Image: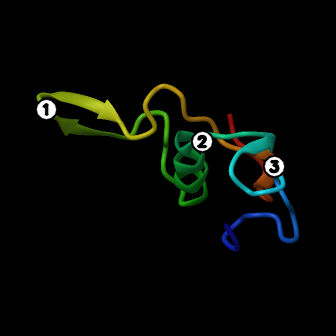
Amino acid sequence: MMGAGVKGGVSYGATDQFGRRAEENPTTVWNIYSTVMYLLGLDYRNLSCHHTGIDERLTKVHGRVVKQVVALPLSA
């Protein structure tokens, strides 16, 4: 990720020597979605879509903003 409120020159986490598994600061795809939506100015906690008859959050219940990569101050 780069630009639009993401800290420049920051490395978040590390992998094993082959790049197959996260060794430090593993994160989920839901956290990445939440971070991107936060940087776009969307309320990632309340944004949902209608899928198979129910309203489902795009970040499920697991998504959290990865604060270590965000250059902007987090609100609430």
Label 2 sits on what residue type? Asn
**Is mark 3 in CB contact (under 8 Å) with mark 2?**
no
Write down the residue under mark 3.
16
Q: For the residue labelled by badge 3, is the local secondary structure a helix, a strand or a loop?
A: loop
Q: Nearer the viewer, residue 21 or 25?
A: 21
* 39 lies left or right of 37: right
Q: CA distance from mark 3 to mark 1?
A: 39 Å
- Crowd rating for badge 3 (residues with CA inside 10 Å; few <14, some 14–19, many 20+): few
* Circle 1/circle 2 CB separation < 8 Å: no
Q: Earlier in the sequence, mark 3 or mark 2?
A: 3
As shown in the figure, which amino acid type bears the numbered disc 1? Thr
- Circle number at residue 31: 2
What label does residue 9 carry, if any? none
Indicate the amino acid at tag 3.
Asp
Residue 41 vertical placement versus 6 (above, below): above
CB atoms of marks 3 and 1 within 8 Å = no
In the picture, measured across the screen, residue 13 lies left or right of residue 26, that is right
Quarter containing the N terminus: bottom right
Q: Quadrant for the C terminus, please.
A: top right
Residue 65 at x, y percent in the picture? 65, 42
Image height of 37 relative to 59, above or below:
below
Mark 3 vs mark 1: which is more N-terminal? 3
Q: Residue visible at 55% across and 35% down?
A: 63
x 52%, y 53%: residue: 37
Task: Give neighbour class at mark 1: few <14, some 14-19, many 20+ (Cα, 10 Å).
Answer: few
Inter-mark Cα distance, 1 to 2: 23 Å
State the residue position of label 1. Answer: 52
Seen at 39% across and 41% down, the residue is 58
Residue depth check, mark 3 versus mark 1: number of the one nearer the observer = 3
Per the image, label 2 sits on a secondary structure element best described as helix
